[in-house]
Amino acid sequence: MNNQKGAGAMALTPEIEFEDLEDASDAIETSQTYRIDFENNRITNELINGLDAIRQFVYIALHTERYSYSVFSHDIGNELQEVLSDQNTTDTYKKMEIPRLIEEALLYDDRILAVTNFEIEKKDDAFIVSFTVEADEGMLEIEEVLGEHV
C-alpha cells in the first residue's frame, strides 16, 4: 500500500470540515426582514433592510418589555417599565437611568455600534427621549415617548 497521496487525491478530515463550517459562519448576515405596520398591528409583505430594518428593531426594543412575551428571546426588549413606573424614585433618577436602559436594550444587536446624544424631557407623565443610533449602515435619529401608559 502506498502512503503517498497522489496529485488528485483529497483527504477529508474533521479539521477541514470544521474550517469550512467556520468560514460559513463568518458570512455577512443581512438584516432583511418584513416591515411591520404598527398602526394596524400587522406584518406586511414588504421586505426592508439596512437602516429601515434597524429603525424597526429600535422601535420594537423600546416598546417591548423584556421577558413579557415568550415569542421574543430574552435579548429583545427593555427594562424601562420598572424604573418609569416606580413612584418612589425621582424624575432626576429616571432621567439618569433611561440612557443606560436604552443602551442595554439596543447594543446587544451587532448592527448597532453606539447609542449617543441623549436628550430627555419630562412632559406630563411621560419622558420624551431623543438620541442617535450609530449603526454599521449609518446614523439614525430617534425620538420616542416613554412611560406614557405606565
Image (cartoon, helix red, strand yellow):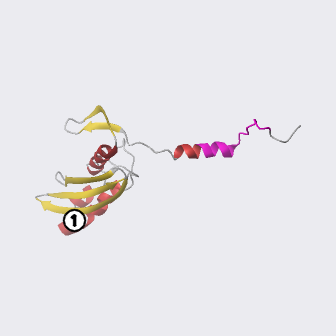
Q: Is residue 16 left or right of residue 52?
A: right
| Dot 1 crowding, Cα within 10 Å, few <14, some 14–19, many 20+ | some
Q: For the point 29% across and 58% down, which residue is it? A: 102
Q: Residue furthest front?
A: 7
Residue 126 in the magenta stretch? The answer is no
Q: Nearer the viewer, residue 105 or 5?
A: 5
Residue 90 is at least partly visible in this image = no
Which amino acid type is shown beneath numbered disc 1? Lys
| Residue 145 screen position, x and y as percent | 18, 53
| Residue 125 screen position, x and y as percent | 13, 57
Q: For the point 36% across and 44% down, which residue is it? A: 72
Q: Is residue 6 above or below residue 125?
A: above
Q: Residue furthest top?
A: 45
Q: Quadrant of residue 93?
A: bottom left
Segment tinted magenta in the rendering: 6-20
| Residue 36 screen position, x and y as percent | 27, 38
Q: Quadrant of residue 98?
A: bottom left
